[in-house]
């Protein structure tokens, strides 16, 4: 059996790679980059020591910590519930575009924190959504969606500007109502349609009756005129017939009367 000899570990050969590795870590950790559309803050032992815009920057390796924030417009969707003026439960989904201003990053980090969307923006949205929805009845919200979104947009722009967050716009992407309310709305629409049809039918009958009255009046007037014309002509005809009969019976001799006066004669017109 052969004897196996173990060579002693050469410490010098291990130290060099360790030094190289440490130098690489130090070199790579001594700078950081801020990409376009972002800003950053630098912390040293938890203390805020500066803010940085896009580009290459130095830092102390293993000591400094960097937090980056996007200053581009960010879109978030929030689901919330509110009560309408008539105490109906309304579910909403809101889409909000917002961003932070680059020169306010230190204030935002100190006052709002990196997760300002959940700590400040969401509670603000929920609070003012409830306040605005409470001004409308549930059935009016369906047609007033644009107006509600406009009111929320104006309020949140002012409120979030105080927090140094810019709200670009707000849109209501969905309204949700209880099944009981939706059924009541449907029944109301059906009743309104039936009432409208009944009203149209009454108007139709009324117009037809008016037309018949006008027609009857016109026919009566026509008959009255015809009767008047026939009566005048009939009288004249009877007069002519009487005169013709008198002429036929005349024997050619003038009648004799005692006394003076004009001589009578039958005039035929």
Image (cartoon, helix red, strand yellow):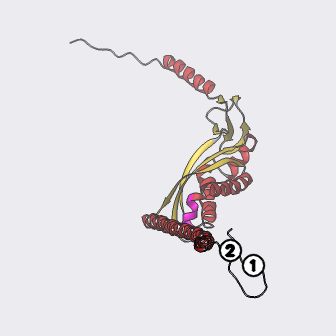
Q: Main secondary structure of the magenta part?
A: helix
Q: Residue at x 67, y 41 (%)?
A: 43
Instruction: Name the quadrant containing residue 39.
Output: top right
Numbered marks: total: 2
Name the quarter where the N terminus is drawn: top left
Q: Secondary structure at mark 1?
A: loop
Q: Secondary structure at mark 2?
A: loop
- Residues 47 and 197: in front is 197
- Residues 110 and 263: in front is 263
Verify whether residue 251 appears in magenta. no
Q: Residue at x 51, y 17 (%)?
A: 12
Q: Residue at x 50, y 68 (%)?
A: 205
Q: Position of residue 190 (x, y in %)?
A: 45, 65
Answer with left or right where residue 95 lies relative to residue 254. Answer: left
Instruction: Name the quadrant containing residue 5.
Output: top left
* Magenta highlight range: 137-142
- Residues 253 and 203: in front is 253
Say whether residue 242 is visible: no
Q: Residue at x 38, y 15 (%)?
A: 7
Q: Position of residue 99 (x, y in %)?
A: 67, 43
Q: Is residue 216 above or below residue 108?
A: below
Q: Position of residue 232 (x, y in %)?
A: 63, 72
Say whether residue 136 is visible: yes
Q: Is residue 52 above or below residue 176?
A: above
Q: Residue furthest bottom?
A: 259
Q: Position of residue 56 (x, y in %)?
A: 69, 27
Label 1, on which residue? 263
Q: Is residue 262 above or below residue 126?
A: below
Verify whether residue 138 appears in magenta. yes
Residue density around tag 2, few if under 14, some if 14–19, many if 20 or more, within 10 Å: few
Residue 266: mark in rendering:
2
């Amino acid at each position: 059996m052969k004897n196996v000899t173990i060579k002693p570990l050469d410490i010098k050969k291990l130290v060099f790679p360790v030094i190289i590795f440490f130098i690489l870590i130090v070199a790579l950790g001594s700078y950081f980059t801020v990409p376009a559309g972002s800003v950053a803050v630098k912390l040293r032992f938890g203390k805020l020591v500066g803010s940085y815009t896009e580009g290459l920057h130095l830092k102390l390796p293993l000591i400094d910590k960097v937090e980056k924030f996007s200053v581009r417009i960010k879109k978030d969707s929030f689901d919330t519930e509110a009560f309408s003026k008539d105490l109906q439960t309304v579910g909403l989904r809101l889409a909000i575009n917002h961003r932070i201003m680059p020169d306010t990053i230190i204030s935002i980090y100190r006052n709002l924190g990196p997760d300002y969307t959940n700590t400040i923006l969401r509670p603000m949205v929920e609070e003012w959504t409830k306040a605005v929805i409470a001004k409308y009845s549930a059935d009016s919200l369906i047609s007033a969606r644009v107006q509600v979104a406009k009111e929320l947009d104006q309020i949140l722009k002012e409120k979030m500007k105080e927090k140094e967050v810019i709200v670009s716009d707000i849109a209501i992407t969905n309204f949700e109502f209880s099944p009981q309310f939706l059924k009541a709305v449907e029944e109301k629409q059906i009743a309104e349609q039936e009432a409208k049809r009944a009203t149209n039918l009454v108007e139709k009958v009324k117009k037809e009756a008016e037309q018949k009255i006008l027609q009857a009046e016109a026919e009566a007037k026509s008959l009255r005129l015809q009767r008047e014309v026939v009566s005048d002509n009939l009288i004249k005809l009877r007069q002519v017939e009487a005169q013709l009969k008198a002429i036929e019976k005349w024997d050619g001799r003038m009648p004799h009367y005692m006394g003076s006066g004009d001589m009578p004669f039958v005039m035929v017109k």
